[in-house]
Image: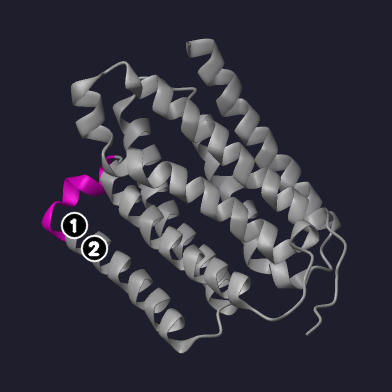
Amino acid sequence: MDIILKIADWTSFFAIIIAFVISIVCWKKDFLYPIQLYIAISFVVNSVLKTIEIFPGNEFALKIASVVVNIYSIVEILIICYFLYLRLTRNVFRITVRFLVVLYLCICLLMWTIYPKSFFVNALPLYGIENLFILTSCIFCMYEILKSDILINLKSDSNFIVICGILFYFSITAPFFIGYFFLIRIAPELDKLLNLLNSIAYTLLFISFMKAYLCQYQEQKQ
């Protein structure tokens, strides 16, 4: 299982690199700029985490890794929700997305203020809340697309493909991030399986980004 986990982890890292290269080559798709920014930041963050893995068991290195991931969670919800926000037309959905982002920032600030040490550990349930908020915003976008009278080819529409990738990843990871410690307490052997599922889903997320960039631009028709 350890070998499989390593392979899945490195596969997701290479997927990020390939997605980053493709986003640079297809730079003319400026409407995907938030996704390009997210890919670039993900590359930097995962590169840092890979470097930290060189020092296994080092307490200081582990704290640095946790700080990086905690900051990444804030950047992640800001960028992805911004991308989704731009594609929403209904005011009620737009207001809700803004509220969810501000609420998550408040939750993080409150937790790290009351429990300062939590900033130096991986708070998986917190990431689960983040994923749930992003998932909610994504569902709003999906609802508007399916209710829209605009004629688009969903198989080759970049925005739709990105939204599908986001919907898949965050719907898969939100439940087991929120219930991670409960699940591990019941069945400790699930730890590696959950990590494997996360790596696979993360890889598919970036594959969806690649697909979105490689799609030909299509005009939307009423």
- Circle 2 Cα neighbour tier, 10 Å, few/some/many (<14 / 14–19 / ≥20): some
**Given the image, on which type of amino acid does mark 1 rest?**
Met
The structure residue drawn at horizontal position 69% and vertical position 52%, both measured from the top left corner, is 209
In the image, farthest residue toward the left: 114
161 above or below 175?
below
Asked whether the viewer can see residue 102, the reply is yes
Q: Where is residue 27 in the image (x, y as percent from the top left)?
A: 81, 64
Which numbered dot is residue 107?
A: 2
220 above or below 111?
below
Colour logic: one colour
Is 218 magenta? The answer is no
Within the image, what quadrant is residue 222 found in? bottom right
Left or right relative to 170: residue 44 = right
The structure residue drawn at horizontal position 32% and vertical position 16%, both measured from the top left corner, is 189
Which residue was labeled with disc 1? Answer: 111
Q: Does the CB distance between marks 2 and 1 fall below 8 Å?
A: yes
Q: Position of residue 72 (x, y in %)?
A: 44, 52
Q: Which stretch is magenta? A: 111-121
